[in-house]
Image: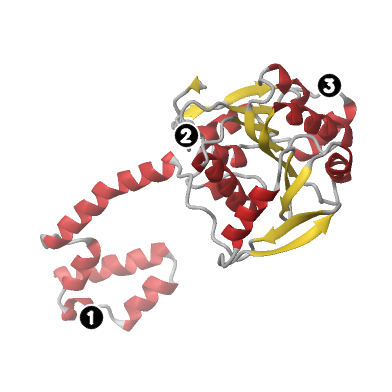
Amino acid sequence: MTARTADLSDGHLPRPGRLSDVKGWFFTADQLLFDWFLARQEDRAEPGDLLELGAYLGKSAIFMGARLRPGDRFTVCDLFDSPAEDASNSKEMAKSYATLTRRAFEANYLAFHDELPEIVQGLSSSVAQHVEPGSCRFAHIDASHLYEHVHGDIVTVRDLLTPQGVVVLDDFRAEHCPGVAAATWQAVTGLALRPICITPTKFYGTWGDPAPVQAALLAWLTGREGVWHEVQEVNGAPLIRLSAKNAKEPAHPVSRHRTEAARDAAPAAAASSASSASGARTPARAAASRPAAARARRSPARRLAVNVLPPFITKAVVAARRRSAAR
């Protein structure tokens, strides 16, 4: 991993205080499932690294990074602000990801983590040059929406996963990118990809045996508040379908900006509390401590002047009253 500290002084970059502040499409159901799959792999001491193809501004990568174990490698591959090599891909980048830059991704990621992942800036087809075959336990494909690219990414990831590794495909059912759906289900029928479950936006599968994973997932889902699920049969095999419209998002990861804000606020809150305890007069307390007669001195005419008349007339009226009172 590349050691890097976060530069928190650049006012031109966003300072996300929580994951929801990072722009992107990573919804509650998928946050819960990413967390469950990665935690299960950790509990079972399954070997392997993490991989993401297509990062946008880092929302899902930040989440995956929170489950990175010591010694694991996390590789993120994205074009970022590099030009695409074909016209159709360039058109899609310009339409959907015009604000995408590597610097924005790094700023967001470093708001939550001390080190950046291994970043491959380039086409997703180049990732095999940087990641060893059979080395990844979890891969998230969210790069191009074009059929030929998604198909290529699936084939590449198949070779990079461990035997029981899990692949997640984004936008497998979105109407604006039918190429993803075609590549996903073709992998099921023609490349032996075996479905585990689906959410409204993502497909989860494996080239290993999905049965133990599905059994464990169903046990976890049973009775879980805010999460709905059912089991359907697709291509002769069970498929879990779930949604989590009323569920709470996982509590992690936590932004360093949020913790720093809390740390900075603590001395001020303590000083305010001490000041109140010692009887120090804040503006509000000072106003409250004035004698009632003094607060009542404003006549109806003066209150009207303060609230209605232009400021320069009000000032003149007040000055005249002060001169009259001083005589």
Front-most of residues 40 and 11: 40
**Which residue is denoted by mark 2 in the rendering?**
113
Provide the secondary structure element on which disc 2 rests: loop
- Position of 293 with respect to 14 (left or right) is left
The image position of residue 213, as x and y in percent, is 64, 48
Front-most of residues 26 and 6: 26
Provide the secondary structure element on which disc 3 rests: loop
Q: Is residue 173 above or below residue 59?
A: below
- Position of 325 with respect to 53 (left or right) is left
Of badges 2 and 3, nearer the viewer stands 2
Of badges 2 and 1, nearer the viewer stands 2
**Which residue is denoted by mark 1 in the rendering?**
296
Tell me which label, 2 or 1, sits earlier in the chain: 2
Quarter holding the C terminus? bottom left
The image position of residue 17, as x and y in percent, is 47, 46
How packed is label 1: few (under 14 Cα within 10 Å), some, or many (20 or more)?
few
Q: Who's the residue at 64% across and 55% down the image?
A: 215
Q: Who's the residue at 39% across and 78% down the image?
A: 304
Q: Residue furthest top?
A: 129
**Which residue is denoted by mark 3 in the rendering?**
85
Q: How many marks?
A: 3
Of badges 3 and 1, nearer the viewer stands 3
Give the residue type at disc 2. Answer: His
The image position of residue 24, as x and y in percent, is 65, 45
Give the residue type at disc 3. Answer: Glu
Give the residue type at disc 1. Answer: Ala
Do we see residue 26 in this rendering? no
Tell me which label, 3 or 1, sits earlier in the chain: 3
How packed is label 3: few (under 14 Cα within 10 Å), some, or many (20 or more)?
few
Q: Who's the residue at 83% across and 21% down the image?
A: 85
- Distance from disc 2 to disc 3, alpha carbons, whole Å, reads 32 Å
